[in-house]
Structures are given as structure tokens and as C-alpha cells.
Amino acid sequence: EDILAVNFYFTTIEASAVTANRFYNIDKKSGTLITLDSLFKKDADYVTPISNYILSEMKKQNDDGTGFYFLDGEEQRYTKIRNDQHFNINNAGNIVICFNEYEVAAGAQGCPEFKIPKEIIKDILK
């Protein structure tokens, strides 16, 4: 009720297609743009627990054959989220970390999204 999440979805088609998303989360009461770091206590390290969770999920999906994430080899490797990482807040109030196509995985993976369980960040949320 308090947050408006807007997703702009872009597809560029030349020889093949590339998809990118831009997310904006707005506090409807104050009218301000919500940034990822604004959701956490001052000086809290939110990057590490979120990144570790995403990495474990990527490894799990790669291991069971449902993921095509760049974790090994010569491709760009995922190590952690960026400070300006794309995200949205879903209807249940969960933070959902979003990546563009080819950013962390093969194109067949599309635009990967990871819903962050509240229990791994509950102690550092505002």
C-alpha cells in the first residue's frame, strides 16, 4: 500500500534480442525514490548477505540443470550485487534483486530475479 514499484522493460532487437529492465520504487507517502541502501540501517552491510544468498541460489540452479549462471570459466563471473543494483519490492514486501539479460547468466536464463528471504536481512532492515 505504501510503495509504488514501476518496471520499464526494454527489448532491443538487431541480429538477436537483448532485454533490460529499469525499476523505480517510490514511497507513496513521501513521494521519494527508494534506494536499496535506504531500506537498511545506517552503515549496515546488506551487500554481503544478499550476495551470498543469490550466489547460493545460482549454484543450486546450475547444479540441478535449471540455471545457466556465469560462476566458473572464462565468462564474466557473478561475485556480488552492485551498490546501485536493480531491485523491486513485490506485493508481499520482499526485496527482489533483478539482473538484466546476459548480466550474470546466459541469454537463455532471461532476466533473472531473486526474492530475498526476510529472515536473512531482518536484523539490518530499518
Image (spheres, helix red, strand yellow):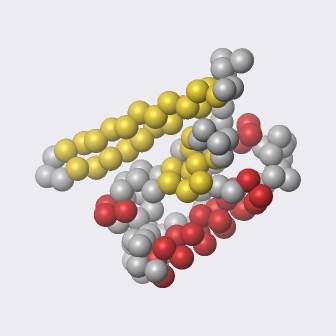
Above or below for 75 versus 22:
below
Q: Is residue 10 left or right of residue 35?
A: left
Q: How far from the left and from the top, in percent, is residue 30? A: 72, 17
Along the viewing direction, whichever of 64 and 8 lies nearer the viewer: 64
Above or below for 126 versus 46:
above
Q: How far from the left and from the top, in percent, is residue 46? A: 74, 53
Q: Residue at x 50, y 30 (%)?
A: 6
Q: Residue at x 57, y 51 (%)?
A: 97
Q: Residue at x 50, y 54 (%)?
A: 113
Query: Which quadrant of the figure contains the N terminus?
Result: top right
Q: How many marks?
A: 0
Q: Quadrant of residue 69?
A: bottom left
Q: Residue at x 60, y 72 (%)?
A: 56
Whether residue 33 can be seen here: no
Q: How far from the left and from the top, in percent, is residue 59? A: 53, 76
Query: Which quadrant of the figure contains the C terminus?
Result: top right
